[in-house]
Amino acid sequence: MRIRTVAMLGLALITVGACSSSAASSSAQAYKLTLIQGVAGDPFYVTMACGAAAEAATEGVTLNVTGGNKWDATVQKPVIDSVTAAHPDGVLVAPDDSRALLSPLKAMNDAGIKVTFVDTQLDDTSFAQSVISTDNLAGGTLAATTLAQLIGDKGSVLVVNVDPGISTTDARVKGFSDEMKKHPNITVLDVQYTHDDPTAATTITTSTLAAHSDLAGVFATNVQNAEGVATGLKQAGNTTVKTIAFDAGPKQIADLNAGIVQGLIAQDPYGIGVAGVQQTVLALKGQATTKVIQTQLAALTKDNVNDPAKQKFLYKASCS
Ligand code: T6T
């Protein structure tokens, strides 16, 4: 497998080939695919790229991986535009905003590039070959029932989220908030946004601990928020507040094992990457695709995190 990293316009661009480019281009079906990550460097998207690269190798297609260095639609838009200009055959994309990126992604589709949504999606999915994600609503519900149990069904809970307008994290918060309505002795505080910055999550945790003496639990909606919340609880020496977080990056697993976080709702980003390549290649071959695919999730605790069956839900820092 060939992996090449190129610094371009401040973006990380990785080329992963199943075989040498000359060999790939000699095959009639050596399609060129690009994966546009929600943000580069996030273990969720690193793992998704590993799955996509493995499937690309199996199928004999080439895969470029790119992404902005920040979760921000204004950073992702030029990345999308430059991929459209490069004109691969198909693109797997995780849009950073469910509305703001409609126009550049429609332009990509109108240019004849097959588009598949992986993880996040737009409000308008009409032109997508396939939409592949976790059942984020169900994950949010599971986070709420687990947290309610951990805190004895009473007290205040803090929700630390990325930004409004992201399909995945919006659905997680909806599932969480709707479920918490069934728990009258739990007060869900106003959702706080971090723009995907762990430092902001730490600051929010510190100030909420100070302002709400009955704070009993936290729901952190993704990797960066979970990392920042754990840091805030550690810095405060707090051992009473219970935390449930989405995702299963390496630092999150360490925090779970250390007892700082009590539960993780882990996704299967590797499987999303595999399915994304499979569906895009089917579309390119003119074969039927599956319009909506929901991949598995798993509830991880300190007690089950080492089970063999859970290992596929742990995210990677790199593919090797
Ligand atoms: O939770 C994942 C992903 O599903 C979400 O859309 C954005 O955040 C992550 O990448 C984790 O940081």
Image (cartoon, rainbow, N blue to C red):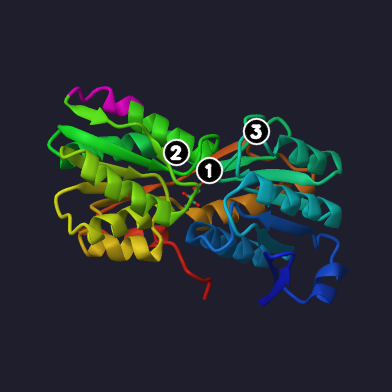
Q: Are marks 1 and 2 in contact (CB under 8 Å)?
A: yes
Q: Which residues are magenta?
A: 178-184
Residue 24 appears left or right of 50: right
Question: Type of residue at label 2?
Answer: Asn
| Number of the front mark, 1 or 3 | 3
Residue 210 visible in the picture: yes
Name the residue type under label 3: Arg
Inter-mark Cα distance, 1 to 2: 8 Å
Q: Nearer the viewer, residue 124 or 75?
A: 75
Whole-number angstrom distance, CA of label 1 to CA of label 3: 17 Å
Disc 1 and disc 3 in contact, CB within 8 angstroms = no
Cβ at disc 1 under 8 Å from ligand 1: yes
Q: Is residue 45 left or right of residue 229?
A: right
Which amino acid lies under the numbered mark 1 shown in the image of this protein?
Ser
Which residue corresponds to mark 2? 136
Magenta-colored stretch includes residue 179: yes
Name the mark nearer the viewer: 2 or 3: 3
